[in-house]
């Protein structure tokens, strides 16, 4: 599935053109997959009117129909109704045997020789109608972030969740992003500034398998923005301008915008700037702990990367936390202005709910044991990596987060508390051989 998003439509059209060339009969190395296109409409988040969103969607539909690929138009408002399985790492599919691959290639060749663009292949999903109330909820969610840096980071996270969910529901196993070399160089420096140094290899690498069953790939990472612009001009590639959150903003409006301005201006005087930064990103690797599984809360609740907060006391992260605690303790009201990372979850279900059963006290005439408990408090900070903690810290209230994030946070915390209660009865890895 090929992604189209705001600010990257030129790269998206370029990757779409490469796919068309790879699927043609004259291609030296022909691609062996059936691609699709997905466009995330973020007009509600950037404040566009309904007419402007419809006009943009109509222009993109004309471009997508010319390719013959199936395309899906998804509004960003659908992220509010996603299931909690989006922020859970799914098991990666097992590698099919060689016979299955040969059968798939034969089926592809037969379908291509009989006219690849069958009615099923030309399937398209138009942009559904979005209620105004859902758009207002989305705007409240994005607007709850105080800074443009946090709003952009939050929007990127929500967009990625929606892309992964769309790929899963539509039956795709790969998600091709439109990140080029220039954009990845900017992202590398931006991630360092935002405290995502531990996640650089996944954020800028060619392949990203943080979601397990859906692999994120970046096939345009070897081409700079200038090369893509020249290619689009020489071959008259159709492009559609779509505004984003940082459109018409100053260079110092956000960390992302400032880093982009710094890299592009430095590239103008020193042409090897982008390539040098890009080659640095190729050497990065992430060593994920073996405990990072789908059932263990060792992954960030938002970005789905391995948590980087479980470090030793003699580390830069602990030094930062200590400095922050000391600075907050100097003022009496500092504890009241701390990030709203803790929310109270409603206690409406039975304590043993989740499988549709109750605890059994209702049959004896008593109330559920959860009715006597106080409302559960969810500590989001313990479930997030350092960078996502900074994003949540800039939010006025975490209650605006989508329900699938809050429910998964509650589930992870309950599981962690249960593990702590039975920890003395669990066997360590060193005790299994005794």
Image (spheres, rainbow, N blue to C red):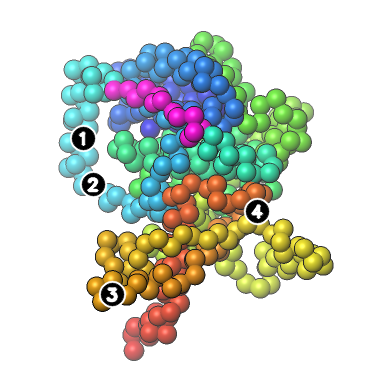
Label 2 secondary element:
loop
For image coordinates 72% across by 58% down, the residue present is: 337
Question: Residue 62: horizontal and vertical position, in percent?
Answer: 42, 13
**Mark 1 touches mark 2? (CB < 8 Å):** yes
Q: Earlier in the sequence, mark 1 or mark 2?
A: 2
Q: Is residue 430 visible?
A: no
> Where is residue 381 shown, x and y percent of the image?
58, 61
Q: Residue 365: which disc?
A: 3
Return the disc, 3 or 4, that comes first in the chain's sequence: 3
- Residue with the mark numbered 4: 393
Give the residues drawn in magenta, as a range.
123-135
Q: How far apart are the two marked residues, 1 and 2, measured between alpha carbons?
A: 10 Å
SS at mark 4 in the image? helix
Give the vertical position of 335 relative to 231 (above or below). below
Q: Residue 344: x and y, percent?
A: 53, 61
Residue shown at the point (57%, 36%) measured from the top left: 139
In this view of the protein, which residue sits in the foreground, 184 or 85? 85
Q: Does 319 sit left or right of 381 as displayed? A: right
Exactly how many numbered labels are in the figure?
4
Q: Please give the residue where the numbered disc 1 appears in the rendered image.
A: 104
> What is the C-alpha distance between the residues marked 2 and 3?
55 Å
Looking at the rendered image, the disc whose residue lies closer to the viewer, 3 or 4, is 3
Instruction: Give me the C-alpha separation between circle 1 and circle 3.
Output: 60 Å
Residue 96, numbered label: 2
Left-right relation of 329 to 160: right
């Amino acid at each position: 599935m090929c992604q189209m998003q705001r600010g990257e439509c030129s790269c998206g059209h370029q990757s779409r053109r490469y796919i068309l060339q790879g699927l043609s009969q004259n291609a030296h190395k022909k691609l062996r997959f059936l691609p699709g296109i997905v466009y995330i409409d973020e007009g509600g988040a950037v404040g566009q009117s309904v007419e402007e969103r419809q006009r943009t969607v109509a222009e993109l539909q004309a471009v997508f129909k010319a390719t013959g690929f199936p395309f899906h138009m998804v509004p960003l408002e659908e992220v509010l109704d996603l299931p909690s399985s989006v922020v859970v790492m799914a098991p990666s599919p097992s590698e099919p045997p060689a016979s299955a691959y040969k059968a798939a290639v034969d089926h592809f060749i037969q379908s291509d020789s009989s006219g690849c663009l069958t009615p099923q292949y030309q399937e398209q999903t138009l942009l559904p109608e979005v209620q105004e109330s859902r758009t207002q909820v989305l705007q409240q969610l994005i607007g709850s972030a105080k800074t443009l840096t946090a709003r952009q980071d939050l929007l990127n996270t929500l967009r990625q969740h929606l892309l992964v969910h769309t790929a899963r529901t539509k039956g795709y196993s790969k998600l091709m992003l439109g990140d080029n070399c220039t954009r990845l160089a900017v992202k590398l420096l931006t991630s360092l500034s935002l405290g995502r140094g531990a996640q650089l290899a996944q954020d800028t690498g060619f392949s990203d398998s943080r979601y397990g069953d859906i692999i994120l790939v970046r096939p345009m990472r070897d081409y700079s923005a200038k090369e893509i612009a020249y290619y689009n001009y020489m071959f008259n590639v159709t492009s559609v301008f779509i505004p984003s959150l940082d459109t018409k903003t100053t260079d110092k409006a956000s960390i992302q915008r400032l880093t982009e301005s710094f890299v592009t201006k430095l590239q103008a005087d020193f042409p090897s700037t982008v390539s040098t930064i890009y080659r640095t990103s190729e050497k990065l690797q992430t060593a994920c702990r073996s405990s990072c599984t789908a059932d263990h809360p060792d992954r960030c609740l938002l970005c789905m990367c391995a948590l980087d907060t479980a470090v030793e006391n003699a580390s830069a992260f602990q030094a930062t936390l200590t400095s922050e605690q000391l600075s907050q303790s100097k003022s009496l009201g500092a504890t009241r202005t701390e990030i709203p990372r803790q929310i109270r979850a409603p206690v409406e279900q039975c304590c043993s709910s989740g499988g549709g059963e109750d605890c059994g006290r209702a049959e004896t005439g008593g109330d559920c044991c959860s009715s006597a408990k106080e409302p559960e408090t969810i500590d989001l900070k313990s479930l997030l990596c350092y960078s996502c903690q900074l994003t949540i810290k800039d939010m006025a209230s975490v209650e605006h987060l989508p329900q699938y994030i809050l429910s998964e946070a509650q589930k992870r915390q309950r599981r962690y508390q249960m593990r702590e209660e039975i920890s003395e009865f669990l066997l360590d890895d060193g005790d299994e051989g005794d």
